[in-house]
Amino acid sequence: MGRGTRAAGARRYGADPAPAAPDPGAPRGVRAPRKSGRGATFSVLTMTLAALAGVGILAAQAEATAPHASTNNSAKASSTSKTAPLPTTLPAHSGSGTRIVYSPSEHRVWLVQGSTVSRTMQVVPGTVTPPAGTFQVYAKSPGSTGGDGKAVVYLVRFDSSSDTVFGFDAVAGLAGMPPKPTGSTGGVRMEQTDALVLYQFASVGTDVVVVS
């Protein structure tokens, strides 16, 4: 065998296979069918897609049956907690009939018409607190000067039995809740809109019930 030649029947890596011998029984001019790998590849692809689809279905079923955190925990906690009394709830032992109820400790005033609270409002107590008891409105003034020297409007005075004059009012020209008084005063301060309502509600002789 000379150099540069290959042995009979030798094949290179990657070369096409030698053609198959013709079938003696096949008709002349008709080639025998060749086996193809496409069918096997299609079967593998179909099985892979089916497996992926099955995994997706199982994942969806697991998500649907898995336990989830309840979104009602906060609602249950709030329903079991104690509810604070409403501002319209009158304090105990606050009298009867049409009256003004004032609680220095709660910083609140209630306007009571008969047995119904017609309005309640937040207030800023004076630096001098009136004693507990029932008093009467004895004077009203659309404008005046408070014991701390502040110009006030819608002044409703009650309890003239002590050296300190007690009453309800609002600081003139001030919007919103007033600051706590710095001087000595029995004035119970509030917003101007609330003070106007109280001024219109009260008459000379209206009861003012001060509770602790």
Image (spheres, rainbow, N blue to C red):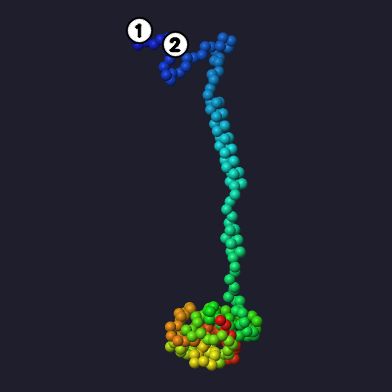
Residue 170 visible somewhere in the drawing? no
At label 2, counting other C-alpha atoms closer than 10 Å, the crowd grade (few under 14, some 14-19, many 20 or more) is few
Q: Measuring from the top left, give residue 124's x and y in whole percent.
A: 50, 80
Q: Measuring from the top left, give residue 61's x and y in whole percent.
A: 60, 43
Looking at the picture, tell me which residue is in the foreground, 87 or 135.
135
Above or below: residue 132 compared with residue 37? below
Dot 2 amino acid type? Gly
Looking at the picture, tell me which residue is in the foreground, 87 or 203.
87
Q: Measuring from the top left, give residue 208's x and y in whole percent.
A: 58, 86
**Label 1 element class:** loop
Quadrant the N terminus occupies: top left
Q: Residue at x 58, y 51 (%)?
A: 68
Q: Residue at x 57, y 60 (%)?
A: 74
The numbered dot on residue 201 is none
Q: Residue at x 59, y 41 (%)?
A: 58
Which residue is denoted by mark 1 in the rendering?
Answer: 2
The numbered dot on residue 9 is 2
The disc, 1 or 2, on the residue closer to the chain's N-terminal end is: 1
Residue 84 visible somewhere in the drawing? yes
Seen as rendered, the residue at the extreme left is: 3
Q: Measuring from the top left, give residue 81's x and y in whole percent.
A: 59, 65
Which quadrant of the structure image shows residue 15? top left
Q: Are marks 1 and 2 in contact (CB under 8 Å)?
A: no
Seen as rendered, the residue at the extreme top is: 1
Q: Residue at x 58, y 12 (%)?
A: 26
Above or below: residue 207 compared with residue 91? below
Which quadrant of the structure image shows residue 210? bottom right
Dot 1 amino acid type? Gly
Cα separation between marks 1 and 2: 16 Å
Above or below: residue 200 compared with residue 21? below
